[in-house]
Image: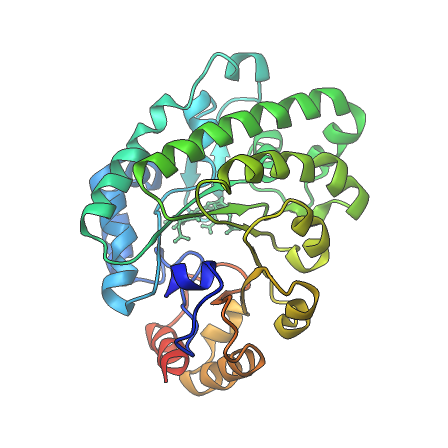
Amino acid sequence: MFLDALQFKNNSGKPPVWLMRQAGRYLPEYRALRREHQFMDMVKNPKVASLVTMQPIQRFQFDAAILFSDILVLPDALGMPVQFKESIGPVFSEKLDLQKLKKGSVAPLSYVKEAIYLIKAKADVPLIGFAGAPFTVASYMIEGGVSKDHAKTKAFALKDTNAFLELMAFLSDKTIEYLEMQVSAGVNAIQLFDTWAGILSNKQFKELSLPFIKRIVDTISQKVPVILFSKASTAYADAFSEAKPQGIGFDITADLSEQRKRFPRMVIQGNLDPDVLLTSPEIVRREAKKILSSMKNDPGFIFNLGHGILPETPLECVQALLDEIRS
Ligand code: CP3
């Protein structure tokens, strides 16, 4: 069903569904494993990563699995180690040094390849691979971790534009190599996350991020379908469409039926507000219905959230969402 929608031929009347961060902390079975391991140790252990990837499929029968990993494994593999600290998030222990990273390679990411082999051997649903878009990955590398305003990233891009573009070009090449590794190991589609693109003006986005997204989409979309996602997808949908991905994952601000009018031949994914899943099964059904009826019988629609599912989400709300979509 998921692959049908990606090929614009879903005629089951029900859209396929998966959720961003579906493998994660809202699942008790994830939290149980997480108590025993550091996050990066889980990501780097193919057995554990494949197990966690399959947890949401086993519990909820989503129509696609997304690889359990993170967008920051790329800088980590290239020689800029990352750690995920409780209630802080990702932290880089070293400062960005592009000349050092240029000596690195994506070879350490073979643990991802191994995880994909294990998942493909047992999964009966398509597997989505992913990477961060160079701009979003660069912003974490420049900030040294999580940032509220991304001021350092913007200052770097504006003051030292050539060095910034050199970093972006480098990350694009490595992202292509990394995604080609995922594709050759067997993923069925790729989602590229430019989560923080919205901190840029439209013009800045077109100069500083879009050309690199294009390079990646040009190469990878020949092999498997590519979906672009940002928390600012709605604002940048026209720019995104210039990169010619097969699909766009919309944030909560989009009216999907309006987007369908603008993009008649593009896969549209989205966009229930993750906060809705914190309310009650009744409200979840009511809000899901609005999206479902606005995209009724759309052959290229994939149901998802407008951003990742929140750790506090009650399981019964996820179940209510799936029941509503499948009813
Ligand atoms: O289920 C899935 O969606 C697949 C796995 C996945 C993770 N991260 C696992 C994860 C995916 C696709 C990502 C993408 C990712 N990682 C993005 C882009 C999408 C987005 O959410 O905006 C970004 C910006 C990151 C970087 C990142 N990873 C941050 C900022 C954090 C800390 C904040 C948070 O949500 O915890 C993470 C941690 C992370 N990545 C967790 C998981 C399951 C939680 C780690 C834990 O168990 O402590």
Q: Which picture quadrant has residue 260?
A: bottom right
The colour style of the image is rainbow
- Residue 309 seen from this side: no
Q: Which picture quadrant has residue 147?
A: top right
Residue 278 shown left or right of residue 133 in the figure:
left
Residue 129 shown left or right of residue 58 in the figure:
right
Residue 265 shown left or right of residue 80 in the figure:
right
Residue 191, image x and y in percent? Answer: 48, 48
Residue 92, image x and y in percent? Answer: 50, 30
* Residue at horizontal 54 percent and vertical 83 percent from the top: 293
Tell me the quarter of the image containing the C terminus. bottom left
- Residue 248 seen from this side: yes
Given residues 135 and 37, the one toward you in this image is 135
Given residues 66 and 73, the one toward you in this image is 66
Residue 282, image x and y in percent? Answer: 44, 87
* Residue at horizontal 33 percent and vertical 65 percent from the top: 62
* Residue at horizontal 58 percent and vertical 80 percent from the top: 294
Tell me the quarter of the image containing the N terminus. bottom left
Given residues 131 and 40, the one toward you in this image is 131
* Residue at horizontal 43 percent and vertical 79 percent from the top: 13
Total labels drawn: 0
Residue 144, image x and y in percent? Answer: 57, 32
Q: In this view, does 147 lie above or below 110?
A: below
